[in-house]
Structures are given as C-alpha cells and as structure tokens.
Amino acid sequence: MPEQTPHIPAHQAAPLPKAVLIRTPNWLGDLMMATGFIRAALEMFPGVRIDLIVRAGFERLPLPRRGEIRVFDRKTASAGAFGKSLRGAGYSHFFVLPPSFSSAWMAFRSGIPHRIGYAGEWRSLLLRPALRHSHAPRSVHLVREYLDLLAPWGHAELEAQPAGLDMPPEWVEKHLPERLREHPPYVVLAPGAEYGPAKQWPDEHYRETARALADAGWPVVVAGLAKDRELGAEILAGLAGGLNLCGETGLLELTALLARARLLISNDSGAMHMAAAAGIPQIALFGSTNPHWTAPLNPRAVLLQNPQPCAPCYRRTCPLGHLRCLQELPPGRAVEAALKLLAE
C-alpha cells in the first residue's frame, strides 16, 4: 500500500518559504533523528536560509543547516518570551518538531505566518496548519512523522534521509579525546540510558560481551556519564586494553569518539542515535521501547530484542518487575553480531 501523508485541508496553500526556522527536539536521540528532517528540508528548499532552534547544550554539535543556530535556554527565557524575540527576523515558516504545547506557543508568539506542526496538547489554535497524524501513535518511525510535516511541498522518502551530522575528518580529529588519538581501532560500549532502567541491558551482559570482544583482540572503550563511571569500571575489570571514559567526555568528544569507533553496542539511547548519525556499524538493544518507532536509521545497524507479550510498554522501569525483554536477551547474540560486523 502507498504511504499515507497527513491530512492537509484543501484550503491550505503551500507557499514556498523565504526563510525557515526549525524548532528541534529536546532529547539528544530525537535531535539526532531530526537531522534526517533537516536534510530533507535543505533538499526541498534549495537556496533558502534554514536556521535551527536547539536546546542549550546542543548548540556546538555539527548539525546540518543553511544558516544559524539559535539557542533556547529555559533557565533564562520562557518559550513565549523566546518566541517573541524572533519577531522581525524575516522568517516565513516555522516547523515545530517537538509535540509539546510550549514549542507551539513559542511558534505562535514569534508571529511567523506559517507554523507547521501536529495537533494535540491544545496546539491547534497556535499552528497554521496544525496537521493530523495519518498513523496510529508510534506505529511508524518518528522520522517518518517529522518528514510528513513537509507533505504540503512534496514527499520525502524515509530511506533517503538517514540521520547525519556534518563531521569532516578535521572536526573529528579536533574533538577526539586525547587518550584515543594514538589508540588502536576500538569498540565502544554505552551501557547507560537516561530514560530509565527499562531500557538498560543488564550490567552482567555488558561485562560478558566486553570479555568476549577483548578475547577476540578488540580494545573496549566504555562511554557514558559520570554516574556510569563505576559501572564502566566493573565492565572492564580484568580486561587488558580497556578504557573507561565515563564522565570524561563532553558531547562533542563523545560524538568524535563514536565517529572514530569500529562499532558501538548500546541500549536505545542518545548514544545509539549519535552512532547512526556518524554512520558507524552498531548493535542496538531494545527492551521497553519499539524499534518500529525509534530504530537507528543506519544501514549498518543490527537490532536485537527479545519480544515479550508486555512489550513495548515504554515505561521507565519494568511494571512487572522481571525485565525479561532485556534479561533474556543473551550476550551471545550481541557478541555473534558484533564479530560479524567487525569482520566486514
């Protein structure tokens, strides 16, 4: 069956934009996926200035654009005040990717004539147009939902718009952690998941995987936040050549170390989508979430899951207390897939 696109009211014209502003998502993983939408917009509107609004902390990422990055820091300005500050900047179109009321309110307060986003959360009166979803919630990939906001101007194929950052080799070299500059080819494990433990493969599974990779001659790097430092040490305990960088890398350094990696093994997390944007081989482990909705858009990705009748539940912690979707996803499957990818 042909893909459906959002319902566009017959009276809604689709004037070509003179200048575009895109409100990008607040979660790192969603932002990485949104790079597919940004690239589609760049192709669909050649020569048009395309600026981005990003959450404070993401502004130095090498995001694709044809213009500037505007930083929204909710600690210093409300969504409405930030939107009002955009008046007179010459934008004709404002694409609202987050589903929140505040992001639509920001667009409304900007006074930009064409404010394109999805209805819901009392947003219909704030957007022009407020589109309706053509699919059941979470039944198609999130990037498909983003791309459908461009439906008034044409159809963008999902497969033609993988996630992607603008990372020339000199950018990667500049931001690569010092300890990896002369390091032999390495595999990265990212065992954390900010969303919650229902996304986290068990610690012992990561330890067994790291041991198997080290036995196969691959140095293992563990990446994560400072709170993952102890876990990183446990995963690498007794392994020669292991490197625990948890808490030692900022966002740019993490991006660069992933770009240089031979492989990433991770949960459904921001790191997973950063690896997809870097285009490296990866193994993505899914538990409480649905890969149909948030799988990495990367032809070099292998998805592993252990489907359960209760999944996907999208809960931060397992409501049944057993976490079988991840507990019963054995390390052997990840190791087998990893060695196959590393041999290619």
Image (cartoon, grey):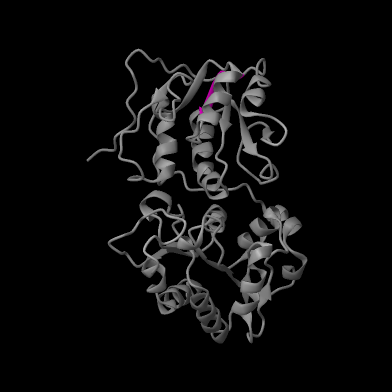
Per the picture, the main secondary structure of the magenta-coloured stretch is: strand
| Total tally of numbered discs in the picture | 0
Q: Tell me which residue sits at (47%, 61%) in the image.
A: 199
Q: Position of residue 228 (x, y in %)?
A: 63, 67
Q: Quadrant of the N terminus?
A: top left
In this rendering, position of residue 294 left or right of residue 191: left
Q: Tell me where residue 68 appears, x and y as whole percent.
A: 68, 32
Residue situated furthest top in the rendering = 11
Residue at image position (48%, 58%) is 268
Classify residue 25 by image quadrant. top right
Between residues 219 and 42, which one lies in front from this camera angle?
A: 219
- The residue at 47%/35% (across/down) is 99
Looking at this view, name the residue that lies furthest to the left.
1
Note whether residue 109 is visible: yes
* Membership of 115 in magenta stretch: no
The correct choice, above or below, for 139 with respect to 118 in the image is below
Q: Which residues are magenta?
A: 91-95
Instruction: Give the image location of residue 75, x and y in percent.
Output: 70, 36
In this view of the protein, which residue sits in the foreground, 5 or 266? 266
Q: Is residue 93 magenta?
A: yes
- x and y percent of residue 239 in the render? 63, 85
Q: Nearer the viewer, residue 210 or 121?
A: 121
Task: Please state if 342 lies on the left or on the right of 49 as rendered.
Answer: left
Visible residue check, residue 185: no
Q: Is residue 114 left or right of residue 221?
A: left
Quarter holding residue 317: bottom left
Relative to 184, residue 141 above or below: above
Q: Quadrant of residue 92?
A: top right
